[in-house]
Amino acid sequence: MTGSMQIAFLETAQGELDGAIEYYNRERHSLGDEFLIEVLRALDRIAAFPEAWPQFSTRTRRCLLKRFPYGIIYQYSGNSILVIAVAHLHRKPDYWKRRHRV
């Protein structure tokens, strides 16, 4: 990751990431790995420019993945980023808003 930015995931967000990787790997061999690479690239962009993405709610921002229908919902403060959700863009909107520190 870029610089000294610390990145952490809420447990539910980590579960979403893991579930999506598993789903895509079932769909096509190594597609889940490609999804993970795309997520890591998005996290690098977020770490480098945490204010570059529009606010999605009062304390959160959303960075869209380029190749997959997902967004990384995150909050940042100082040198830390907290991933609130790895959200599929076709799910119920705002389902993640009940999560910690939103």
Image (cartoon, grey):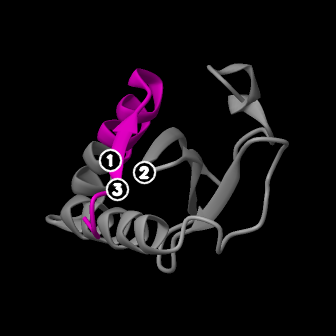
The quarter of the image holding the C terminus is top right
Q: Is mark 2 on a helix, strand or loop?
A: loop
Quadrant of residue 95 in the image? top right
Depth check: 59 or 70 in front?
A: 59
Crowding near the residue tagged with mark 2, few <14, some 14–19, many ≥20 C-alpha atoms within 10 Å:
few
Say above or below: 3 vs 80.
Answer: below
The picture places residue 53, in percent across and down from the top left corner, at: 68, 70
In the image, the segment drawn in magenta is: 1-20
- Secondary structure of residue under mark 1: strand
94 sits left or right of 30 in the view: right
**Residue 79 numbered tag:** 2
Q: Which amino acid does label 3 sit on?
A: Met
The three-letter amino acid code for the residue at tag 1 is: Gln
User: At 32% across and 47% down in the image, what residue appears?
Assistant: 6
88 and 62: which is toward the camera: 62
Q: Is 5 contained in the magenta span?
A: yes
Dot 2 amino acid type: Asn
| Relative vertical location of residue 63 with respect to residue 17 in this rendering, above or below | below
Q: Is mark 3 on a helix, strand or loop?
A: loop
Q: In the drawing, does residue 48 fall left or right of residue 24? A: right
Residue at the image position 45 percent from the left and 34 percent from the top: 13
Q: Position of residue 48 (x, y in %)?
A: 43, 73
Q: Tell me whether circle 2 and circle 1 mark residues in contact (CB < 8 Å).
A: yes
CA distance for labels 3 and 2: 5 Å
Q: Which residue lies furthest to the right in this view?
A: 58
Identify whether 96 is placed above or below 35.
Answer: above
Q: Does the residue at mark 3 contact the one at mark 1 (Cβ under 8 Å)?
A: yes
Q: Do the residues labelled 3 and 2 touch (CB within 8 Å)?
A: yes
The label shown at residue 5 is: 3
Residue 27: which numbered mark, if any?
A: none
Say few, some or many: other residues with alpha carbon within 10 Å of mark 3 (under 14 / 14 to 19 / 20 or more): some
- Residue that mark 1 sits on: 6
